[in-house]
Image: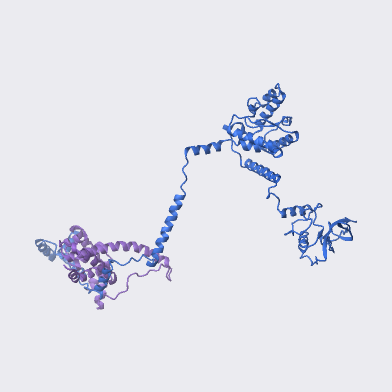
Chain colours: A purple, B blue
């Protein structure tokens, strides 16, 4: 597979996976680019044991998990720094939205609102659970593929997927009823 | 509904159940509204997730990817790097400098190794009794100050020899009567300060300066202070009176000497007061020697001399400045200000020395001089003699100190005051 073929076939998939994992376009683009660069570097060594999409999804999920770990460390220091900067009018520590402003994911307002609620529900899941749900529901990967990507046994994937779905069902109950 | 059934619903939705088991579960679901509701809820959630829109790549994504890839950068610079790249070399240099200073400081602080023999030498010196000091300054110092150079040298030699050889006995030295008296007085004062009793025999003729082991020098065995009375009797009754006197003196010298001299093993360190007194004594002796030798630097300051003169005259604070043209200031035998002031500066100094208020009045010293009277008074007559100007004056009881200063026509002769009351 040439580099261009690889990018043509997987860049958008990787970006969408990154978008569901991160929840915003800016971080999604950053994550997708880093994942694709890593994949391109390792492309020559790819032996074809699995589908290319599965392989690049695995790279993307691992890159994202590493980022989440370092982001948590950075978030600690950011919290300290924000607290240091001062108080708001009510005397509370100023909380600054560190997410980039972005346009809604969809132009249709109703759809966009629903998508936003689903995306927020996704972001409330643990990282591993979120990755499993996204890979299963959106990317439609099998238990086996998900287990291979995340280095988890299939039984663990199954139980975590069930736990994540149960949590999502609780979070999205109003949306489901409205639908 | 138990968790097992819910998990089975999840597996059914995902198509993870074997075909036969899936068919059997479908029949079970059809019979159970509860299972059907759970299936519908899970399917709805799954649909919500699957309905999430598939986004197109952002505009310029591939160009940015290529640019980033060409820069060899898989990830942008982390946010926590605040220092601009231009300043990083300076930061690195500063860090290196700090590390170098710390390392240098640590290395510099490393103590030099103490060799065994050096350690032993230090210990010996610390434990050794200060014999030389004691001989020269505690036993003989007062006398040494008054003795001739040879006598002092002898005492010092004895002290030095005693430090070198514990068995060495310095020769006893006979003192002239007046010097012996001085030495005994000084010794008595020192002993009193230390609380030691002084016997009347201290005043006996033939006292001598001795050192450690002085008894050996006189042919008598060393004796302790406790055994002194008996030893004294025996030594005094020796066949040769002179030797007996020397031996007694030597033993007394040991008894009066500090304990450190008598028994080096039981030497005690000097207290702070003793050490201070000894140093002060040494310093005074040294200053005295310097004066004898005419070494510059020991002379009191000029202002000090002026202060002493003025204090003796009861005038008080010394003038802030003594003019070099002021005559008779240091040499005034009557302890007062110069009799005649012939310059403005001398007049100003005298004015302030007398603590007169305000500034001194203007005086034309090209035509006038000012006579300083011992007391407030008035000038009666002036009479020029061959070498001096005799000024007769009388005291004015009610006059103020300003009346001590009286202007007279300028004269280059010295002034002699004659009081006429």
Instruction: Compare residues B291 and B370 and report the one nearer the observer.
Output: B291
Whether residue B15 is visible, yes or no, is: yes
The reply to whether residue A126 is visible in this rendering is no
Q: What residue lies at 70% left-to-right and 40% top-to-bottom?
A: B145
Q: Is residue B373 above or below residue B206?
A: below
Q: Is residue A134 left or right of residue B276?
A: left
Q: Is residue B420 left or right of residue A81?
A: right
In the rendered structure, the answer to whether residue A141 lies left or right of residue A94 reads left
B47 with respect to B388 (left or right)? left
Point 46% across, 52% down: residue? B105
B356 in relation to B52, above or below:
above
Q: Quadrant of the N terminus of chain B?
A: bottom left
- The percent coordinates of residue B410 (x first, y second) are 84, 63
Q: Is B241 located above or below residue A75 in the figure?
A: above
Q: Quadrant of residue B128?
A: top right
Where is residue B59 drawn, in percent x and y? 25, 76
Percent coordinates x, y for residue B212 in the rendering: 62, 31
Q: Residue at x 26, y 78 (%)?
A: A109
Rendering quarter of residue A95: bottom left
């Amino acid at each position: 597979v040439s580099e261009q073929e690889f990018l043509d076939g997987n860049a958008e998939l990787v970006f969408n996976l990154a978008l569901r994992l991160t929840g915003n376009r800016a971080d999604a683009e950053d994550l997708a680019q880093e994942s694709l660069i890593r994949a391109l570097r390792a492309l020559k060594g790819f032996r074809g044991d699995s589908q290319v999409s599965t392989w690049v999804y695995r790279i993307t999920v691992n890159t994202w998990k590493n980022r989440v770990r370092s982001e948590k460390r950075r978030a600690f220091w950011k919290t300290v720094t924000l607290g240091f900067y001062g108080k708001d009018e009510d005397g509370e520590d100023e909380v600054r939205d560190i997410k980039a402003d972005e346009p809604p994911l969809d132009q249709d307002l109703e759809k966009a609102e629903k998508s936003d609620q689903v995306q927020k529900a996704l972001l409330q899941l643990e990282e591993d659970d979120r990755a499993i749900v996204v890979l299963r529901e959106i990317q439609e990967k099998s238990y086996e593929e998900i287990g291979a990507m995340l280095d988890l046994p299939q039984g663990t994937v199954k139980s975590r997927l069930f736990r994540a779905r149960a949590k999502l069902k609780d979070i999205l109950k109003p949306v489901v009823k409205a639908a | 509904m138990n968790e097992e059934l819910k998990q089975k619903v999840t597996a059914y939705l995902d198509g993870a159940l074997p075909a036969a088991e899936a068919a059997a579960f479908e029949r079970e679901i059809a019979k159970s509204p509860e299972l059907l509701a759970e299936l519908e809820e899970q399917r709805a959630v799954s649909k919500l997730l699957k309905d999430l829109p598939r986004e197109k790549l952002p505009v310029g994504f591939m160009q940015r990817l290529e640019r980033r890839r060409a820069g060899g950068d898989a990830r942008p610079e982390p946010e926590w790097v605040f220092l601009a790249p231009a300043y990083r070399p300076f930061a690195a240099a500063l860090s290196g400098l700090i590390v170098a200073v710390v390392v240098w400081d640590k290395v510099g602080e490393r103590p030099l190794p103490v060799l065994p023999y050096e350690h032993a030498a230090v210990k010996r010196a610390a434990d050794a009794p200060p014999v030389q000091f004691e001989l020269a300054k505690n036993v003989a110092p007062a006398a040494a100050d008054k003795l001739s150079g040879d006598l002092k040298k002898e005492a010092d030699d004895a002290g030095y020899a005693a430090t070198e050889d514990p068995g060495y006995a310095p020769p006893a030295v006979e003192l002239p009567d007046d010097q012996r008296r001085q030495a005994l007085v000084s010794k008595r004062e020192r002993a009193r300060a230390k609380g030691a009793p002084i016997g009347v025999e201290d005043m006996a003729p033939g006292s001598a300066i001795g050192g450690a082991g002085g008894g050996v020098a006189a042919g008598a065995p060393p004796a302790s202070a406790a055994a002194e009375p008996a030893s004294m009797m025996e030594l005094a009754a020796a066949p040769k009176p002179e030797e007996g006197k020397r031996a007694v003196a030597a033993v007394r010298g040991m008894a009066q000497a500090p304990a450190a001299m008598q028994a080096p093993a039981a030497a005690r360190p000097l207290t702070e007061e003793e050490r201070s007194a000894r140093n002060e004594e040494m310093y005074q002796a040294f200053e005295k020697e310097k004066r004898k030798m005419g070494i510059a630097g020991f002379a009191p300051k000029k202002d000090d001399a002026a202060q002493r003169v003025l204090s003796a005259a009861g005038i008080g604070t010394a003038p802030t400045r003594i003019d070099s043209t002021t005559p008779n200031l240091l040499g005034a035998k009557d302890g007062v200000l110069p009799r005649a002031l012939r310059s403005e500066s001398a007049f100003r100094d005298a004015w302030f020395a007398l603590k007169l208020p305000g500034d001194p009045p203007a005086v034309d010293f090209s035509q006038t001089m000012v006579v300083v009277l011992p007391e407030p008074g008035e000038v009666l007559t002036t009479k020029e003699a061959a070498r001096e100007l005799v000024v007769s004056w009388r005291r004015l009881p009610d006059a103020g100190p300003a009346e001590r200063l009286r202007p007279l026509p300028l004269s280059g002769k010295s002034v002699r005051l004659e009081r006429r009351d």
